[in-house]
DNA sequence: TGTCACATGTAACCGGTTACATGATTGA
DNA sequence: TCAATCATGTAACCGGTTACATGTGACA
């Protein structure tokens, strides 16, 4: 149950509507916690009921009203409480591993192509993250506070994607080497 | 929805009861797809209804009956179908990233200690995986077929844990360097 | 005496996914 | 004209988590 807290973090940086949050998630906290707009809308309503955030309706011309949320005192308290609380380290969860494990029970060529596809997709994400790093954090040694934390989260995304790409490459090499035995 | 297929893979290697599968998961497919015994029991029943597996009740002395499942023809077909089907590459999903991102909104020291704790936990898993590698796959170059696939899945687990440990270490270094400014 | 391994289950809950709906504006 | 962007929502579903329950045998 971290979406609440991910939203509190995002709203602490800057207030915004559900729609804005959904887009912001795609390129920051989303590296570690993806969310769809439906889910964000629902959780924001729940958080409003709980008094963690305050809603302000903003009328717009030609567009639907915007519901801008900002963090309330109770939300700040809840976030601080959660930050100090330990969470379980996660385990990998990727169907590709299951497919590879079962490859000999089906079309091995199809599984190989699937691994290549995932490798390319993760390589594309890696490049996207690296370009964010170049653009937003050219001098990482000078960072501190919130900016340093943002940088380190991005580093986590880069490391994870890199390691996935490397693994896929290892798998492809090994399967190609044994394939045409 | 991969637990069905993960179970089909596991049962294709060897038939077994829900209890046995739960334990096997802890040290093989579990690297990529963890599951609790409750969930396994439920899914096995559903799979039996669908005709993917066949159940045989085995009476035991002093212990409850064992329900041993084996893969049926329909299960083999379903597994082959699923293996050839593409899946979405996954995104990281780890609360630790959210906590780090929000560290300046709470007790930064607590977040740092949490990162250290996760680093140690992932390092322990890494060592466990490496010892499996040494014991079960001393000569990886000689592998092929199912054994090669098993080895490559283990390699994925090792790479993921290693990259997580490295990231945590980077975070700890950076936070310690700025901490006592 | 107490805990661990064996073995399976019910029930409630909740977080996340998917499909579908609405409606205006902007730009290719 | 078509797609994309802005902006929010309902509804159904489903996979996974957590808590609790039961009962024996082996071992420290």
Image: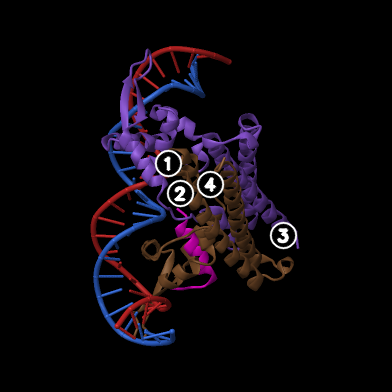
Chain colours: A brown, B purple, C blue, D red
The answer to whether marks 2 and 4 mark residues whose Cβ atoms lie closer than 8 Å is: no
Q: Please identify, in this view, whether the residue under mark 1 or under mark 4 is nearer the observer.
A: 1
Q: Chain of mark 1?
A: A
Q: Chain of mark 2?
A: A
- How far separated are the C-alphas under marks 1 and 4? 30 Å
Residue A106: numbered disc: 1
Q: Secondary structure at mark 2?
A: helix
* Residue identifier under label 2: A110
Nearer to us in this view, A92 or A118: A118
The answer to whether marks 1 and 2 mark residues whose Cβ atoms lie closer than 8 Å is: yes
- How far separated are the C-alphas under marks 2 and 4? 29 Å
Q: Quick one: label 1 or label 4, which is nearer the N terminus?
A: 4
Whether discs 3 and 1 lie on one chain: the answer is no
The answer to whether marks 1 and 4 mark residues whose Cβ atoms lie closer than 8 Å is: no
Image coordinates of residue C13 in percent, x first then y, are: 34, 47
Whether discs 1 and 2 lie on one chain: the answer is yes
Relative to D23, is B6 above or below? below
Q: Secondary structure at mark 3?
A: loop
Q: Chain of mark 4?
A: A
Circle 3 residues within 10 Å: few <14, some 14–19, many ≥20: few
Q: Quick one: label 2 or label 4, which is nearer the N terminus?
A: 4
Residue B95 counted in the magenta span: no
The chief SS type of the magenta part is helix
């Amino acid at each position: 149950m971290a979406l609440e807290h991910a939203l509190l973090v995002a709203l602490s940086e800057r207030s915004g509507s559900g729609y804005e949050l959904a887009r912001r998630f795609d390129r920051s906290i989303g590296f570690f916690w993806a969310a769809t707009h439906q889910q964000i809308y629902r959780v924001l309503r729940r958080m409003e009921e709980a008094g963690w955030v305050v809603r302000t309706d903003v009328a717009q011309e030609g567009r639907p009203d915007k519901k801008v949320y900002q963090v309330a005192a109770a939300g700040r308290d809840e976030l601080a409480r959660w930050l100090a609380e330990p969470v379980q380290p996660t385990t990998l969860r990727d169907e590709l591993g299951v497919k590879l494990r079962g490859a000999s029970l089906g079309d091995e060529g199809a599984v190989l192509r699937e691994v290549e596809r995932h490798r390319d997709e993760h390589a594309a994400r890696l490049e996207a993250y690296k370009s964010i790093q170049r653009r937003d954090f050219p001098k990482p040694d000078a960072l501190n506070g919130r900016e340093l934390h943002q940088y380190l989260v991005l580093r986590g995304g880069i490391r994870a994607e890199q390691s996935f790409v490397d693994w896929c490459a290892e798998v492809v090499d090994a399967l190609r080497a044994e394939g045409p035995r």
